[in-house]
Image (cartoon, helix red, strand yellow):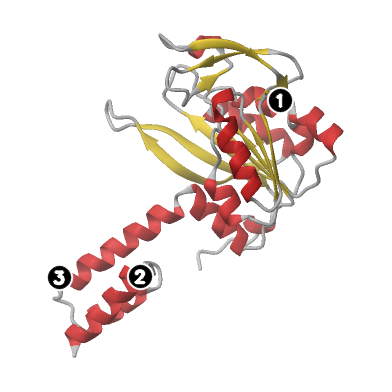
Amino acid sequence: MNSSTLLDIIEKHIEGDAEGVQKEYEDFLSRNPSDLIARTLLYLARGQTSFVRNSKHGALYNLMRLGFQPATVFDVGAQTGTPPLFDVFPQAHHVMFEPVAECENALKGLCSQLKSAEYHMVAVASKNAPVELWVSDDRKYSDVLARNRVTGGECRIVEGISLNEFCKDSGKIGPYLVKIDVDGAEMEVLKGATSLIEESSIFVIEASMLDENPRMGKIIDFFRPFDFVVYDIIDYLHRPLDIALWQVDLIFVHKNSPYRQKKTWS
């Protein structure tokens, strides 16, 4: 009877319900405390749930579950697209910005598949002006800040725009979800995006801690005058050198956001 019950739980676990089966494993272990297989699988389910929740997809899904529904999603540094943005919010209008020309075909194909989307092959910056862009040899990374260049790669001059000017001319409406991943130029993007920092907006921003241009503290300080605070920390990346925490993504909301109003644990 016990083995059959455990197999039923395992079947649900295999089907993908790592969160739901935890209570069932716990109930099973209350009756069979010495069952090492069930205990191991419980720890596995907890780890899987934590891993998913600490991802961009998990965090955005949780915000959606709590009621967040952006009208416009800005993907700054889109490369070939950011699946969590359009997977969790398929009904929103998606606006993708990417300065690396080699990514255009992928973005064009992606936008044709989404309900409402557009892409722009430009670098997002603090103002509308041409910018010098360093592009890695494999075309996976780009950087508008010369001090961050490494040996190799290619320098290009590309069009630069600010989100303030873009939104003024395009009439995009909120609530806004703004994801920024630009390999070092996050502060420049934010300086040109102040019109999007509305009480209903949410920002997801890559923030490094240990490179030559650590941005976490600067980004947090930038949002403070707007009464925006860190709501979540996700997508932890540890460097191989010493397994130290290299960067994370920070999620910012307004201090009066409905997602911050409950002050109890459970």
**In this picture, is 57 found above or below 42?**
above
Vertical placement of residue 157 versus 54, above or below: above
Q: Residue at x 80, y 42 (%)?
A: 172
Can residue 257 be seen by looking at this rendering? yes
Q: Is residue 81 left or right of residue 44?
A: right
Whole-number angstrom distance, CA of label 1 to CA of label 2: 45 Å
Pick the front one: 30 or 170:
170
x 27%, y 61%: residue: 44
Looking at the figure, which quarter contains the N terminus? bottom left
Local SS, label 1: helix
How far is mark 1 from mark 3, CA to CA?
54 Å
Residue 196: give x, y in percent of width and height.
76, 38
Examine the image and state in which quarter residue 153 appears: top left
Q: Which residue is mark 2?
A: 15
Q: Which residue is mark 3?
A: 36
Q: Which residue is mark 1?
A: 191
Type of the residue with mark 3: Leu
Is disc 3 placed on a helix, strand or loop?
A: helix
Up-down: is 73 above or below 260? Answer: above
Dot 1 crowding, Cα within 10 Å, few <14, some 14–19, many 20+? some
Q: Residue at x 55, y 30 (%)?
A: 103
